[in-house]
Amino acid sequence: MARILFIIPFVLLASAASAQQGQDACARDVSRFCRAHMNDGDMAILACLKQNRARLSKPCAKVLTDHGQ
């Protein structure tokens, strides 16, 4: 679970404040939809989030969109 706290900031490649927002917005979605990919690296998690875009929470989907994903 601690890995989730560090995944999203690296995936989004944003400033510290933005990354914290992304982490908060997507942590639950990562644990819900991408648990199987949590040890596969940041790009695998990003790909998983993109595959599940229709099921993501609105805040997480917005963070991805705002960061060009």
Image (tube, grey):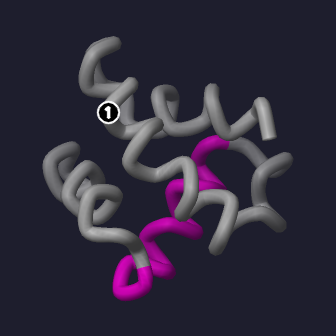
Image quadrant holding the N terminus, namely top right
State the residue at coordinates (48%, 80%): 52
Q: Say if 42 sits above or below 35 in the image.
A: above
Image quadrant holding the C terminus, namely bottom left
* Residue 64 coordinates in the image, percent (x, y): 28, 54
Residue 12 in which image quadrant: top left
State the residue at coordinates (58%, 69%): 48
Residue 67 in which image quadrant: top left
**2 or 36: nearer the viewer:** 2
Name the amino acid, label 1.
Answer: Gln
State the residue at coordinates (43%, 71%): 50
Crowding around mark 1 (Cα neighbors within 10 Å: few <14, some 14 to 19, many 20+) is some
Residue 41 in which image quadrant: top right
Residue at the far left: name it.
66
SS for dot 1: helix
* Residue 20 coordinates in the image, percent (x, y): 38, 25
State the residue at coordinates (36%, 39%): 22
Q: Is residue 47 magenta?
A: yes
Residue at the far bottom: name it.
54
Q: Say if 59 sits above or below 21 in the image.
A: below
Q: Is residue 56 magenta?
A: no
* Residue 33 coordinates in the image, percent (x, y): 64, 73
Residue at the far top: name it.
16
Q: Which residue is mark 1?
A: 21
Q: Say if 52 sits above or below 46 in the image.
A: below
**42 or 24: nearer the viewer:** 24
Write down the region rendered in magenta: 42-55
State how many labels appear: 1
